[in-house]
Image (cartoon, rainbow, N blue to C red):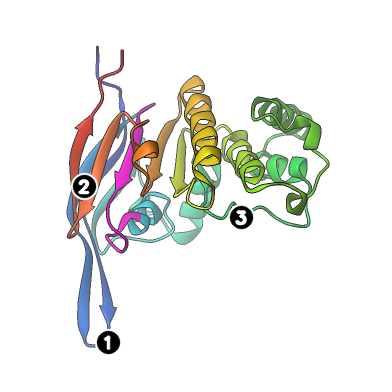
Amino acid sequence: MSQPQTLIRIAHVSKRYQEGDRERVVLADVEAAFGAGEHIAIVGRSGSGKSTLLNLLAGLDLPSAGEIWIGGDCISRFSDRARTLFRRDHIGFIFQFFNLISTLTVRENVVLTAELSGWKPPAARAQTDRLLDAVGLLDRAQTFPDKLSGGEQQRVAIARALCADPPLILADEPTGNLDADTGAQVMGLLTALARERGKTLIVVTHSSEVSALADRIFRLDHGRLLEVAHRHPA
């Protein structure tokens, strides 16, 4: 089987923080390439730099050295505004604590993502309802997030992440606030929808069940990113 086209390239990336009078190295000369449509899991102990790496891939933070490439764009060279606009149009997010807007309904939470990316209202509404139907929550479209269970809120967050049709989905401990059974259902849904739509999915996780769904598993250890498993598609 041919290799997927590279979507993300991490080139000699380091990240250091100053803590008082000492420097803390979180990432040290990290290199990796992730293909379009691949599903990647990043594992490692707490404090190993997993979320730091995800923030760099999202353009929420800048590396101390090295470059982050997504498609043909070196986002680590962009201005703050350019990174914000790139993120809005190219990256979907799923967070551990859902991060839904409590004053908006389920439908409003999801449709906002597409509208901010420039979708016309009728197309954004149609896309929203397709995704809410796909995650099994179209009948809850007028509900507010506080009336939903944790698993339902995370399903809304999946629909929101996919709504603007970005090529890249980043998920930071997406099952970390859910019980094991609900987490498995949510992760199965996310994986299926991402594969169906050809999305590159990068998941930071502590869960071996979640990482087992990935095509490739990487471990962050002492600032280094090491590939530890590669599952060949059937």
Instruction: Specify which label sits upstream in the sequence, 2 or 1.
Output: 2
Instruction: Specify which label sits upstream in the sequence, 1 or 3.
Output: 1
Query: Residue 141: percent from the left, percent from the top?
Result: 79, 37
Residue in front for this viewpoint, 140 or 30:
140
Residue named by callout 1: 20
Q: Is residue 42 magenta?
A: yes
Residue named by callout 2: 11
Q: Which residue extends farthest right?
A: 142
Amino acid bearing label 2: Ala
Residue named by callout 3: 99
For label 1, the SS is loop
Amino acid bearing label 3: Asn
Q: Residue at x 32, y 54 (%)?
A: 50
Amino acid bearing label 1: Gly
Q: Is residue 126 left or right of residue 193?
A: right
Whether label 2 touches label 1, CB < 8 Å: no
For label 2, the SS is strand
Q: Is residue 92 magenta?
A: no
Judged by depth in the image, the label closer to the viewer, 2 or 1, is: 1
Query: Residue 116: percent from the left, percent from the top?
Result: 66, 45
- Real-space Cα separation, disc 1 to disc 3, in angstroms: 32 Å
